Amino acid sequence: MVIDSHQHFWIYDPVRDSWITPEMEKIRQNFLPENLKPVLEANGVDGCVAVQADQSNSETEFLLQLAEANDFLKGVVGWIDLRAENLYDRLEICSQFEKLKGFRHIVQGEPDDFLLQSDFIKGVGQLVAFGFTYDILVYPTQLEASYTFAKQLPNVKFVLDHVAKPYIKKGEIETWAKDIKKLAELPNVSCKISGMVTEADWYSWQNADFEPYLDTVFGAFGTDRLMFGSDWPVCLVAAEYGAMKDVLGNYLTKLSKNEQKKVWGENAVKFYSLD
């Protein structure tokens, strides 16, 4: 089974979605399951995990409604106020939704030490009681804090989104690679191979641009803690789905069939407890 562990849906709103800049004009439109399903089918992908793109309870409800209506949408990573005083009670209510697998906060838009706030750490720690996961969305400058954060919560299942958005276009790798290796020392942290084409030169990237970054994450996490994700439709600003998927596909040819299966889907099924 091939699982896209990271994609988004939205009904485009220019105010809410102001992060979609003019040069990203291609994605200033609605993206819904009926748009994604034929793309997944054409690329041999069996199912997907929808991840929040807006920090609101209504976003989580929206994604759950889509998941309820579409079997290929296997799981949802929503948003919840992880610093709320009544968080435990709210998580208890959330646990009733079978397809709700975990939560994410857009930490890349926060100060570098955001993850180290005691109330946030306490909130994420409460996810364990309900079997929820947590997606770490950060920039390279926040990787050091991510390690300190995740180390304090050894029972939480973490996954790093977009390999922490390395500066591929600039070819910067040393500091990022050092911090990635350190984070990967924590056995409860996995990593999504996603969002890479948008960190490269959108108009002239080549497969070779990604090799050193892929070498780093495969060397650090191994094939048991890596999973494929598209970051569709955001990836469309730099590549069509097939071209984006081929970046990983070409790299994986050097691995065994068993290892390839893990990265393409088995690890995502296991991490998110997908049916």
Image (cartoon, rainbow, N blue to C red):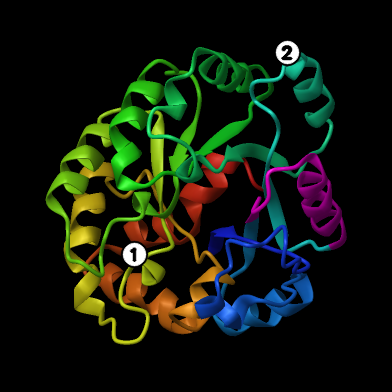
Q: Is residue 62 visible?
A: yes
Residue 257: give its label. 1
Q: Residues within 10 Å of mark 1 (few under 14, many from 20)?
A: few
Query: Magenta residues?
Result: 50-69
Residue at screen point 87% across, 61% down: 69
Q: Is residue 185 above or below residue 38?
A: above
* Amino acid type, label 2: Glu
Left or right position of 216 against 245: left
Whether residue 27 appears in magenta in the rendering, the answer is: no
In the image, what residue occupies the spot 80% across and 31% down? 94
Q: Is residue 218 left or right of residue 146?
A: left
> Mark 2 = which residue?
85
Which secondary structure is most common in the magenta stretch?
helix
Indicate the position of residue 64 as horizontal and vertical percent values. 81, 49
Answer few, some or many: residues within 10 Å of disc 2's Cα (few below 14, many 20 plus, some between 14 and 19).
Answer: few
Task: Reply yes or no: does residue 55 show up in magenta.
Answer: yes
